[in-house]
Image (spheres, helix red, strand yellow):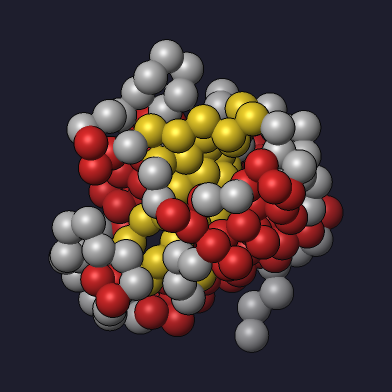
């Protein structure tokens, strides 16, 4: 379902479409913040950079001017995304502990920010080292979350010149679409708005 999904919900003039779309995205953001149950199972974790070209292999100073997004994806199920200020171990591992059940199996790349995850009680942590041209080793890989990054970037590139303040709303829309990919989005949205109508300022 493309950008015109709002036209399936309520008749609307073109000039007002952005107002309604922003309200829908804000509701999606609010719902994502309420869904606090941790992911359980085979969990892939990774960070990605949105915006201008990043210096290959650089994280931190190489991410200057870009928006850094961290994500956790349960294979075959859902993803959680969050904008982060840096890719330090303290920042990333804090999110992992809050969003992934301790019983989960964690899959990551070789970034040092993931060092020591087992010290927090995660018994299994598998890594692939992209710097050594290793992208999969048996069941150890982060291919699924990297596919999501590709999907999100292809979708968001359509909104050239997007105000950075709006980025999180668009990101959470990508998350919502992915997490409900097996459902009829029109019906999901209708159910949301029947429970609580949109608030337009």
Residue at the location (40% across, 51% down)? 111
- 147 or 141, nearer to the observer: 141
Q: Image quadrant of residue 89?
A: bottom right
Q: Position of residue 59 (x, y in %)?
A: 32, 65
Q: Position of residue 145 (x, y in %)?
A: 44, 38
Q: Is residue 148 left or right of residue 103?
A: left
Query: Which sits in the foreground, 44 or 132?
Result: 132
Q: Foreground residue, 35 or 5?
A: 35
Above or below for 152 versus 162? above
Q: 195 left or right of 81? A: right
Residue 185 at x, y percent in the picture: 57, 39
Residue at 28% over, 76% down:
61
- Where is residue 167 shown, x and y percent of the image? 42, 70
Q: Is residue 187 visible?
A: yes
Q: Is residue 201 above or below residue 21?
A: below
Numbered marks: total? 0
Query: Taking 157 as reference, is 160 above or below it?
Result: below
Which residue occupies 78% across, 53% down?
A: 36
| Closer to us: 88 or 32 | 88
Residue extending furthest top?
A: 138
Quadrant housing the N terminus: top left
Q: Residue at x 24, y 42 (%)?
A: 131
- Name the side, left or right, on which 46 lies relative to 129: right
Residue 10 visible (yes or no) = no
Quarter of the image that includes the C terminus: bottom right
């Amino acid at each position: 379902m493309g950008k015109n999904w709002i036209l399936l919900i309520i008749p609307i003039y073109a000039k007002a479409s952005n107002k309604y779309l922003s309200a829908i995205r804000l509701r999606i953001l609010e719902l994502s913040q309420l869904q606090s149950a941790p992911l359980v199972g085979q969990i892939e974790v990774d960070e990605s950079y949105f915006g201008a070209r990043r210096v290959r292999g650089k994280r931190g100073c190489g991410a200057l001017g870009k928006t850094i997004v961290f994500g956790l994806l349960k294979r075959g199920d859902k993803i959680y995304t969050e904008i982060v200020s840096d890719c330090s171990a303290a920042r990333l591992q804090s999110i992992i502990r809050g969003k992934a059940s301790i019983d989960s199996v964690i899959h990551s790349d070789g970034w040092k920010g993931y060092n020591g995850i087992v010290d927090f009680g995660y018994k299994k942590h598998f890594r692939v080292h992209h710097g050594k041209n290793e992208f999969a080793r048996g069941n150890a890989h982060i291919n699924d979350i990297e596919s999501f990054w590709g999907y999100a970037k292809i979708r968001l590139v359509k909104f050239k010149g997007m105000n950075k303040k709006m980025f999180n709303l668009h990101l959470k829309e990508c998350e919502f679409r992915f997490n409900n990919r097996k459902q009829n989005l029109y019906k999901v949205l209708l159910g949301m708005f029947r429970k609580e109508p949109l608030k337009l300022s």
